[in-house]
Structure formats: structure tokens, C-alpha cells
Amino acid sequence: VIGRKGSDLIQISGSTSPILRDSIHPRLYRVVSSSAIYADLVVELMKQVGWTRISEVHDFHHIATTEVLINKVSKGGLQIPYTSLYFPGHQSIECILQDFSVTGSTILYVSFSQSRDIAELLCSAYASKMTWPRYLYFVPDRTPSDVLDS
């Protein structure tokens, strides 16, 4: 792997994965990508696959990114019928899913900083039969193993 100890190569990455620890990858440098560029990519993806409505839920750590995303989606002529700020311990995932289900939107963009919160949302959605092909959960910045291991 580029950036590993003993390697003379430097790697620049946008990844914030804890797997890429400094002790193992001391020549790996992280960059934070622009929220605006990321939001533009999400809007372009939505248009490419024919999505016109997407709801979203985020936690406290994703407020700024979510504001940019909502702005870009709206300016792109797309709709966000439901948006919610999730406070773990103060609000139930089931309430979020119930509120989302009555909007008529079938795609939920999930921006949680904790994989365990994502796992809880997906397990609750499964238990409520809010699954594919009726519902789609768009979870950026996570791999399936991140969520399953939580």
C-alpha cells in the first residue's frame, strides 16, 4: 500500500478511515474535499440515475455539509421533501423512519458520523419492512464492513 512505513512514496487521500492510522501509514496525508464539490457530485448522480426526490437525515457532525447539499439539490431542480437532524439518545430512529415514510420519498441520504447509528437505522428499516425495492438508503463515506462491524 502506498504511504506504508518503509515506502518512499507519499499518498494523498480524502479518506478519514481510522484503518489508515498514522503509525501504519506515516506518509499518508489527508485532504478535506470541498463540501460544494461533493454536493455537486451527488446532484449529478441523482440526475444520471433519474432520481428527482431525495430525503436526508444527518447528525450534528454533518450540519455544514448537509446545508451545502440541500442548497445544491434545490438549485439543481431536485426536491428534498424531508430532512432531519438526528440526536442519538434524544430521538428514535423509528420516529425518523416513520416521518420519512409519510413524505412519499423513497430515497434516504444518511450522514451519520457513527457507524453504529447507521447500522441501527438500517436494522430498524429492515424490521419495519422499509427495504429494497421500495426504499433505497444512500450512505456515503462508509463501506458495508464499517457498518456491519459496528
Image (tube, grey):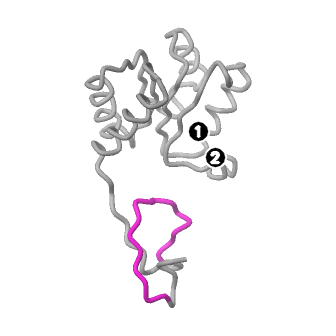
Against 140, residue 129 (above or below) is above
The residues tagged by marks 1 and 2 sit, at their Cα atoms, a distance apart of 7 Å
Q: Residue at x 34, y 37 (%)?
A: 63
Against 119, residue 91 (above or below) is above
Q: Which residues are magenta?
A: 7-22
Q: Residue at x 46, y 38 (%)?
A: 111
The quarter of the displayed image where residue 29 is located: bottom left
* Local crowd size for mark 2, using a 10 Å CA cut-off: few (<14), some (14–19), many (≥20): some
Question: In front: 121, or 27?
Answer: 27
Marks 1/2 in contact by CB < 8 Å: the verdict is: yes
The amino acid on which the numbered mark 2 sits, given as a three-letter code, is Val
Question: In front: 141, or 121?
Answer: 141
* Residue labelled with disc 1: 118
Instruction: Give x and y (percent) for residue 11.
Output: 41, 74
- Magenta span contains residue 105: no
Q: How many numbered marks, from 0 up?
A: 2
Q: Which mark is residue 139?
A: none
* Residue labelled with disc 2: 147
Q: Residue at x 69, y 47 (%)?
A: 148
Instruction: Give x and y (percent) for residue 51.
Output: 47, 23
* Local crowd size for mark 1, using a 10 Å CA cut-off: few (<14), some (14–19), many (≥20): many
Instruction: Give x and y (percent) for residue 44.
Output: 38, 35
Against 143, residue 131 (above or below) is above
**Picture quarter with the N terminus:** bottom right
- Element under disc 2: helix
The amino acid on which the numbered mark 1 sits, given as a three-letter code, is Ile
Q: Residue at x 61, y 22 (%)?
A: 135
Counting residues from the start of the chain, the first of labels 1 and 2 encountered is 1
Against 132, residue 120 (above or below) is below
